[in-house]
Amino acid sequence: MSIGHYLVLSGLLFSVGAAGVFLRRNLITLLLSVEIMLNAVNLAFVAFGRQLGTVDGQIITFFVMTVAAAEAAVGLALVIGLFRHRESLNPEAFTSLKW
Amino acid sequence: MLALIPLLPFAGFLVNATIGSRLSKAVSGGLATAVMVVSFLIAALQVNALFGMAPESRQITQTLFTWITSGDFSLDLAFRLDALSAVMVLVITGIGSLIHIYSTSYMHEETDPEYARYFSYLNLFVSFMLVLVLGSNVLVMFVGWEGVGLCSYLLIGYYYEKKSASDAANKAFIVNRIGDYAFILGSLLMVVTVGSLDFVTIAQTVKTMPAEVGFGALSLITLLLFIGATGKSAQIPLYVWLPDAMEGPTPVSALIHAATMVTAGVYMIGRNAVLFEHAPITLGIVAVVGAATALLAGTIGLVQNDIKRVLAYSTVSQLGYMFLAMGVGAFGAGIFHLFTHAFFKALLFLGSGAVIHALHGEQDIRRMGGLSKHLPITYWTFLVGSVAIAGVPPLAGFFSKDEILFETFRHGHTILWVVGVLTSLLTATYMFRLVFLTFHGEERFAMANGGHAPAHGQAAAHGHAADDHGHGGHGGGHLHDAPPAMATALIALAIGSIVAGWIGIPHALGGHNGLGTWLEPAFTASNCGAPVTSGELAGFAIENCAPGTEPALASFTQTAEQVQPGAGPAEEAHDAPAGEEHDEVALERTLMGVSTLIAFTGIGLAFFLWQKNRHIPEQLARQFSGVHQLLLNKYYVDEVYDAAIVQPIKVVSTEGLWKVIDVKVIDGVVNGAGYVVGGLSAGLRLLQTGSVKSYAAGTFLGAVSILAYYFWR
């Protein structure tokens, strides 16, 4: 298993996540897609860390996971707030935050 | 110690300007006068210290701090007392003190706050004037220069509720701005060319340069400075403000518009004597302008009917004399005349003030006459001043005016000399016309002919504090002579007008020309070891080094019989030893004889025309009504300026600058900028949809394009 395989998988996961963010019309799915993208990046970090024989990749992965957890908590709280407000989870329903 | 001289009057200004309105007249006036007297005493002490020094190193400098440092250019806020500024400081503080004393009485009819305002302005003026003369570099001088302009404005417009007074103040201020603008340009050019603004450094630097043959940088600098001087010192073409400045209280006219501020231009040229010596073209212009102004103002003064305006034109004329002296390179003579003129012109103004005061604001000499028996002190002191200005020996005006005329003649400017002599005749004539019309002849003022009312109406019209205070003997037509404070100042100045000339008695009369010798180092950058060779400048040759040329005369002086200054010029013409200096002395004595003759001719003419045969002037006026009208209307200079400068500026400002440039161009640019930004914003606003997904898409595309750029770069 060369690093290429890991990177291809990472790229695929990232694309899946990005596609999810752009295509799905559900805020919770959007959050999930973001998590997939983050994990794709994590995978790339770990792969590089192993390739270079350092622990840096693993350390930064833990950072990303921590931040992702916090982000998920805040994001879900916002989603609940938004749902209570508009009875909808469609992001297109929340476009009033502009000039 | 030096800084105290201007700071004391400034402290007086601060007190009177802040809490003055709550002080009684005795306190505010007394304080203002006291700071002046103390300032005079300090100045006298400092000048006394100056006396103790060697002539070549006579200067006291006090540096307060470094004001500006920029690259290798640096400028100190510093005061310097040397031979030249010593003369000025003594004149300003000395005569200033006398005028303050006079003012305490002259202004007593004002209310307390107005009284304090007057004295605060007067103190502020003296403070700035002292900064002007004590400043060790051009910039410090300029601070004083602008300051006195401001105070002049404030004091001319002292009766600001009167339209003519505030107009006159504006006129003085605006005309002075023109000169000051040229002064700034000259100073900046000086920084570029000479690299310094310190007077001593300038003189030392310029001294090493050869005198300019054509019209170069030095000529331009000096010409610009001279334009500044024409504004401040009321010379052609900027003299028009001074006659109007007579709207101010009379002591102000005496202090600012006769003795001190208007001589600032003369002082400035004297201060930069070395610089001006190196610009012969400018010096020529100075001399011609001075002589022309002297003659022009003298002729106008001959027909004016306002007592103060006659004196104002006389001042312009005498200032012209000073510039003539400066222009022919006789700097000492110019400063000498400045010194003596300060005494007798201040005296004449204060005397006219006493007359106006007694007549409750009457200024028209056609409604005076016969005042000599009512106002004996005023009359006699005024007469002394008139005799002094007319140039009758041995009074002050004779020596200084004669030195100017002699130097003019000696330097070969025969035409200018003739103009000077003619002006001298005019001076004697118009001054004694004033004396005869005011103090002699029948009484033409309303008060004596019964009824106080007409004079009162006049007082109101002239804004001179329409006074209801009880002048005991109104009914009997009794006039008050100058009260004690005013009389003190008048008598002190009268004594000054008699003796002031004696410090500069020329060698030809057995004197030592003490003032000239005293001033010499100040005009030659204090170093006579290496005099500048300006001899090749035909017609403008200047004796740069007094010790080099004067010893011959000095030794002659010792052998010559010591004569009283009062002795006639012809008396000792036989004692002169043979030799070249003999010719010079003989020439000087001849010229003195001529000018004395001229003075008496002028007085006699005035006596003949306005005392003995009053109908002749009227006949002449009718016969030459064109000339008379021309003179009465001051050559229509104000009208010409109005038509040639003021109206075009008004039209251009209204029709061009206001209605086109301002409304269309400037407003258009500002509004246009607003419209453009508004339009662009309306377009950009479309990008903000509020949709999270479009923002995410934007971010994503952005990131991808940046990566793509680095990837395929």
Image (tube, coloured by chain):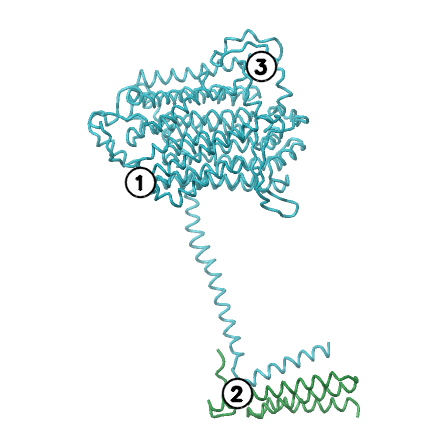
Chain colours: A green, B cyan
The residue singled out by tag 1 in the image is: B111
Query: Are tags 3 and 2 found on a single chain?
Result: no
Determine the image quadrant of residue B62.
top right
Which of B553/A72 is in front?
A: A72
Q: Quadrant of the C terminus of chain B?
A: bottom right
Q: Quadrant of the N terminus of chain B?
A: top right
The residue singled out by tag 2 in the image is: A78
- Quote the CA–CA distance across marks 1 and 2: 77 Å
What crowding class fits label 3: few (fewer than 14 Cα within 10 Å), some (14-19), or many (20 or more)?
some
Residue B316 picture location, percent across and down: 44, 29
Q: Chain of mark 3?
A: B
Image side of residue B374 versus residue B665, left or right = left
The total number of labels drawn is 3
Which of B299/B12 is in front?
A: B12
Image side of residue B428 versus residue B214, left or right = left
- Look at discs 1 and 3 and give the one toward the viewer: 1
Residue B406 picture location, percent across and down: 53, 19
Whether residue B458 is visible here, answered yes or no, is yes
The residue singled out by tag 3 in the image is: B584
Tag 1 near tag 2, CB within 8 Å: no
- Which badge, 1 or 3, is on the more N-terminal residue? 1
Determine the image quadrant of residue B346.
top left
What's under tag 1, amino acid-wise?
Thr
